[in-house]
Image (cartoon, rainbow, N blue to C red):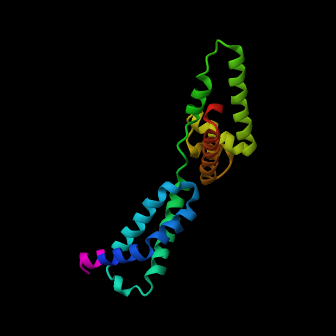
Amino acid sequence: MSSDAKIRFLETIEKDHGRQLRRYLAFRMRDAAADVQDLAQEVFLRLLRIERHEAIRNPQAYLYTVASHVLHQHLLRRAATPETVEIADVLTQLYAIPDTDPLLQAERDQRFEELRRQLRDISPGVYATLVLHRYYGMPLGEISQRLGVSYSMTKKYLARALKYIEQLREQGREEL
């Protein structure tokens, strides 16, 4: 198939279904709307790789099938890669308050203790994983052995802790 035919095929698909595709992706990616354009582009790139586009009987159905696969792979990658929130950053913010004022120091200590309590409330495993990995630098494999859980569960614990801290930071950065 010529590259002109591929481009015409993509232009037609984009014109007929591009807007609906982006709405479909945006609906499924409510918490990461910024990724929608990238995901749509990935869908169209995959369609560009098709050698025989004329063999596609229902281009709209094929488009959404490809979009579902792209979305699924994206979500798997996101789940496997925890958010990059460093506990050291949170601790730095907490300890940036000068120690000269006892009231400010007490408030800082209280906020830090509240963060620890909230993380423990999520799950002791979540809290332990975060502290062992981010504070003591322990590898996830060693943490999983120490806690007696699988490696994938340890990764989930860390992701949950980091996501929770990020949510707290979004709710009010001045509180952390």
- Left or right position of 71 against 1: right
Residue 135 in which image quadrant: top right
Q: Quadrant of the C terminus?
A: top right
Magenta part of the protein: which range?
A: 1-7
Up the image or down, 104 lies above or below 172; here it is: above
Looking at the magenta stretch, what is its main secondary structure?
helix
Please name the residue shown 33% across and 83% down the image: 52
| Whether residue 50 can be seen here | no
Residue 139 in which image quadrant: top right
Count the marks: 0
- Left or right position of 50 against 168: left
Please name the residue shown 53% across and 68% down the image: 24
Q: Position of residue 67 (x, y in %)?
A: 48, 70
Please name the residue shown 70% across and 34% down the image: 116
Q: Position of residue 82 (x, y in %)?
A: 55, 48
Up the image or down, 58 lies above or below 37; here it is: below
Residue 124 in which image quadrant: top right
Task: Identify which residue, 115 or 100, lies in the foreground.
Answer: 100
Up the image or down, 158 lies above or below 80; here it is: above
- Residue 127 painted magenta: no
Q: Residue furthest top?
A: 100
| Whether residue 12 can be seen here | yes
Q: Position of residue 35 (x, y in %)?
A: 48, 57
Task: Identify which residue, 160 or 141, lies in the foreground.
Answer: 160
Please name the residue shown 68% across and 48% down the image: 148
